[in-house]
Image (cartoon, helix red, strand yellow):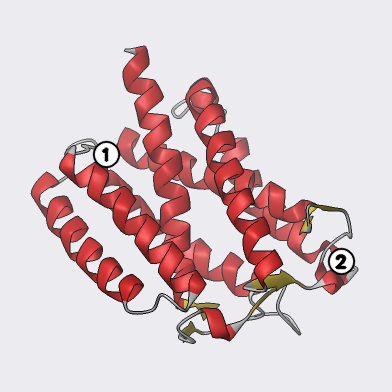
Amino acid sequence: MPEKYTYLLVDFFCIIFPFVFSFYPKINFYKQWKYFVIPCLSTALFFIVWDIIFVEKGVWSFNPKYVLGFYLFSLPLEEYLFFICIPYASVFTYYCIRLFFRKIWNQQLAIVISVLLILFLLLAGVTHLAQLYTSVTFLLLAVFLSVLAVRKATFLPPFYVTFLIILIPFFISNGILTGSFIAGPVVRYNNAYNLQIRMFTIPFEDTFYGMLLLLMNVTGFEYLKKRDV
C-alpha cells in the first residue's frame, strides 16, 4: 500500500465501524444524523479556519509523503475529512454511552472535574501565550467549559466518560498521525509553539484539542435534540 494513503486510511478506519454500527437495530444512530450534521459542519468550519491560520503561521504542517496531494487553502483533503470522521466516531460513541448506561452519571463530580480543568487550562494558557498551540487550545477549551459549567450542562458527565473511552483509539490514530507506528509524522509540529511535552509522539496539547473538537460537536448535538423535544 503506497504511503500516500496513510492519512486517508486513518480517516477511513476511524469512521467505518461507527458508521456500520449506526444501523444496528438497538442503536439506530442513523436516526440521529439530523442532530449531528449541522453541529459537525459548523464545528468543522471553525477548526478548518483555525487549521489554515496555524499552517500559515508555521505552527504545524503536513507531510506530503503521507497524503494524496489534493489541497485546498493549504490543507490536504484528508484534513477536511478528519473533521467529519473523528466527530462522527466520537459522537456515535457518546450516543451509545448515553443509550446503554443511563443512570451512572454524577453531575457533581462532573462539575468538580470541569472546575479543575478550567483552572489548569487558564493557568497553563496564560503562562504560555508565546506557544500558540498551547495558549489558543487551552484558553478556548477553558472558556467553552466555563460556559457549560455555568449553565450546568447535564451532558458533561457522559461526555467525560466518553472522552476517557475514546482516548484508546485516540492514542492509536493520533499516534499514527504523529509518527508512532510509521517512519515519520503525517502532521509535523513546530515545537516553538507547544510545550514540547510528548505522550509517545503525540503532543500534550492534542488531548485538549481533541476534547474541544468533541465537546463542541456534542454540545451542538444535544442542543438540537433538546430543541426538537
Q: Nearer the viewer, residue 227 or 90?
A: 227
Residue 121 against residue 157 in the figure, above or below: below
Quarter of the image containing the C terminus? Answer: top left
Q: Which residue is mark 2?
A: 4
Q: Is residue 121 left or right of residue 12?
A: left
Q: Nearer the viewer, residue 16 or 48?
A: 48
Residue 188 image position (x, y, % from top left): 68, 77
Residue 84 against residue 208 in the figure, above or below: above
Q: Which mark is residue 63?
A: none
Query: What amino acid does circle 2 point to?
Result: Lys
Would you identify the image quadrant in which residue 62 lies?
bottom right
Q: Which mark is residue 155?
A: 1
Residue 4 image position (x, y, % from top left): 87, 66
Q: Is residue 104 visible?
A: no
Determine the secondary structure under disc 1.
loop
Residue at image location 39% in from the left, 42% down from the top: 94
Residue at the farthest left position: 108
Quarter of the image containing the N terminus? Answer: bottom right
Q: Is residue 47 visible?
A: yes
For the residues labelled 1 and 2, the Cα–Cα distance comes to 39 Å
Q: Nearer the viewer, residue 84 or 50?
A: 50
Residue at image location 53% in from the left, 77% down from the top: 202
Q: Nearer the viewer, residue 93 or 120?
A: 120
Query: What amino acid does circle 1 point to?
Result: Phe
Residue 187 against residue 222 in the figure, above or below: below
